Image (tube, rainbow, N blue to C red):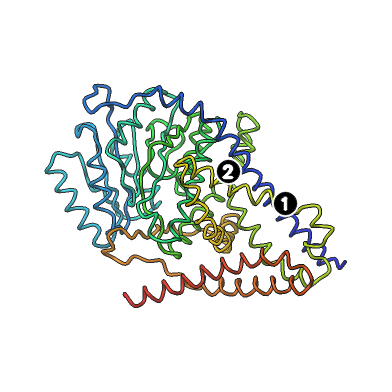
Amino acid sequence: MPFAFTLLLALYLLCSAILVLYGFHHYFMLILFFRAQKKMKVQNAAIVPLTIDDTELPVVLTQIPLYNELNVAERVIRAVAAMEYPSDKHIIQVLDDSNDDTCTLVDKVVSELLAQGYQISAVRRTDRSGYKAGALDYGLQICDAPYVTIFDSDFVPPRDYLLRTIPHLLANKQYGLVQARWGFLNENASLFTKAQSVGIDGHFVVEQVARSYNDYFLNFNGTAGVWRRSAIDDAGGWNADTLTEDLDLSYRAQLRNWKIHYLPDLVVPAEIPSSYAAFRSQQFRWAKGSIQTAIKILPKVWEAEIPLRQKIESSFHLTHYCLHLCMLLQAVLGLPLALSDANPFSDFVLSWYIVPLSLAMVGPSLLYLTAEMWINPKRWWLFITRLPMLLLIGFGICFSNARACLEGFIGVQSPFVRTAKLGDGKVAYSHRSRYMPMIELTLAVYATATAISYSLNGLPGAAPFFILYAAGFFLFSAKSMLEDKQSSKKN
């Protein structure tokens, strides 16, 4: 066997081993999730929601960071103002970094609400330094409220949000944050948004519950959470040195012995990216930011005096986007191995890893199914109909996310690009795909050639694996090019 192909095979099998490891980690999350059910019910049942006239109500600051959000700005501002809480104890900051007509709209809505007796202001900076993290930090500098809740522009909090979250912070002084679950305003807009909802539910229903109620580190999701101000300050405040300032702060706070409490029954609906380009951009930011945070935080996690189990789980948590890098490597390595005698699908190799690989691939699907059935036992049918698209999304996004991981590892800096929101559609905000569709189309052709090569070489069982890559890449390429064409016509 030539040395070069031996190296390729070794790298391919290493990627497979990593995928198997992370695949089995989903089973661990499921075990923790089921173990957490009794504790979750007991803890949350003991907390009685506050009433609007409760004398214990503390002062709360709500921050709404905006940047060119004309389609959704008014909706979120009015929803925040409508939350049930005394106006003399609820301070609202619209952190508006916009440079378009959003500013005019924000001023109009803020003026109306001020006239109605709300404590609300439009806070503007001279520049966007630090992006969202910079805006949040700037707002804290001009307000000393002991509790701070944050809502991104596309979120619509329920009226009783504060009355249901603040009691947990009052009851347990160790809680630095109370996080709610994301819901969806546009889940049924398309098969694409339906599939995304399944993936998001998996994180918010299973993973967040598993970590929160088993004493593992979890993450603030950037919105729909209430912070104890002292926890933010004790952790060092908001930092803009990663693209996931929320993940960074939550880990720094937990390393300072603050706890994050998660409420899966409290749902705050928001928009799911409706375009492929917007989804790709969002995932790129999350993937790159996660790796940046891992590089920054993991050494501190392993140095901290915390249980080994927390260190190991945090390592899985912060590096899970590396899966996409392994997936891309497998897609690229498949063809040269197919053309050689040293392919990873020979009878000898298959006999050693096909069973664990298959079991590992089932893990994520079981996690998603569990999440849907926890929300509603009848949702198992919805899960079945949405799973094929979810699989294609997972394969199709792997090049963009792999690139994000590589940039995170080597320290390439990039600006914080907010995800375009559709809202009421006043303005056609969009993400230009640029060269990405052509790269994805090339990868689709490459994966198709790989599948054909394995079929011709007498290993047709390997072909479906690469057909999934081809279909996923082609889906993102075709849809992105269509979106770019439609966007050009509108402009």
Q: How crowded is mark 1: few (under 14 residues within 10 Å), some or many (20 or more)?
A: some
Residue at position x 49%, y 73% in the image: 478
The structure residue drawn at horizontal position 85% and vertical position 65%, both measured from the top left corner, is 3
Left or right: residue 176 versus residue 70 is right
Image location (x, y in percent) of residue 274: 40, 61
Return the mark for residue 150. none
Q: Where is residue 19 in the image (x, y as percent from the top left)?
A: 67, 52
Name the residue tied to disc 2.
317
Of residues 310 and 138, the one nearer the viewer is 310
| Number of other residues with Cα within 10 Å of mark 2, as a class: few under 14, some 14 to 19, many 20 or more | some
Quarter of the image holding residue 423? bottom left
Occupied quadrant, residue 354: bottom right
Whole-angstrom CA distance, mark 2 to mark 1, is: 17 Å
Amino acid identity at mark 1: Ala
Who's the residue at 11% across and 43% down the image? 115
Q: Identify the element where label 2 is drawn.
A: helix
Q: Is residue 304 above or below residue 427?
A: above
Kindly identify the residue that appears in the image at 48 percent across and 56 percent down: 195
Left or right relative to 159: residue 244: right
Between disc 2 and disc 1, the foreground one is 1
Looking at marks 2 and 1 on the same chain, the residue that comes earlier in the sequence is marked by 1
Q: Quadrant of residue 169 in the image?
A: top left
Residue 87 seen in this snapshot: yes
Count every numbered label the image shows and give the total.
Answer: 2
The quadrant the N terminus occupies is bottom right
Q: Which of the numbered marks, if any, corresponds to residue 17?
A: 1
Q: What amino acid is labelled 2 in the image?
A: His
| Side of 242 relative to 305 (left or right) | left
Question: Is 427 placed left or right of 476 in the picture?
Answer: left
